[in-house]
Amino acid sequence: MVLIVSVLIVSFAMASLAGTADAATPRPFQNCHQFNAKYPHGVGKVGARDKTTGKPVTNFTRNNYVYLRAMFFNKRLDRDRDGIACEKQ
């Protein structure tokens, strides 16, 4: 019985420490300036089309994983909700 209680206490302590570490993990991209440093023309989902009244951006990186990860951490990277994060020509 004492062994089970000890294991539960240690497990709880480790779980609470892991939660603290996750909360302190910074977002991969805080803003479009940081995002465009790695992806100069933005990243979009495969098949995404730029919403614009001018010339649409077509030279962005197409990668569903990177786009969805960026949206998970910071939805403001795709303000016009066209499936392309931080597009620029």
Image (cartoon, helix red, strand yellow):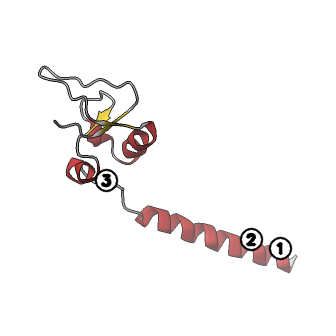
Q: Position of residue 22 (x, y in %)?
A: 48, 63
For the residue labelled by badge 2, is the local secondary structure a helix, a strand or a loop?
helix
Q: x, y (%) of residue 23?
A: 44, 62
Q: Is residue 78 above or below residue 16?
A: above
Q: Which residue is mark 2?
A: 8
Above or below, 61 against 24 in this view is above
Which residue is painted at 42% across and 45% down in the image?
Answer: 69
Quarter where residue 70 is shown: top left
Label 2 Cα crowd, 10 Å radius (few <14 / some 14-19 / many 20+): few
Q: CA distance from mark 2 to mark 3?
A: 37 Å
Alpha carbons under labels 1 and 2: distance apart: 6 Å
* Label 1 crowd bin: few (<14), some (14–19), many (20+), radius 10 Å: few
The part of the image, by quadrant, that contains residue 56 is top left
Q: Which residue is mark 1?
A: 4
Q: Nearer the viewer, residue 16 or 55?
A: 55
Q: Quadrant of residue 68?
A: top left
Marks 2 and 3, the one that precedes in the sequence: 2
Q: Position of residue 26 (x, y in %)?
A: 37, 61
Identify the secondary structure beneath mark 1.
Answer: helix
Residue at point 18%, 37% (across, down) = 88
Disc 1 + disc 2, Cβ < 8 Å: yes
Q: Amino acid at mark 1?
A: Ile
Amino acid at circle 2: Leu
**Identity of the residue furthest to the top in this view:** 53
Q: Is residue 63 left or right of residue 30?
A: right
Q: Which residue is mark 3?
A: 29
Q: Earlier in the sequence, mark 1 or mark 3?
A: 1
Q: Quadrant of the N terminus?
A: bottom right
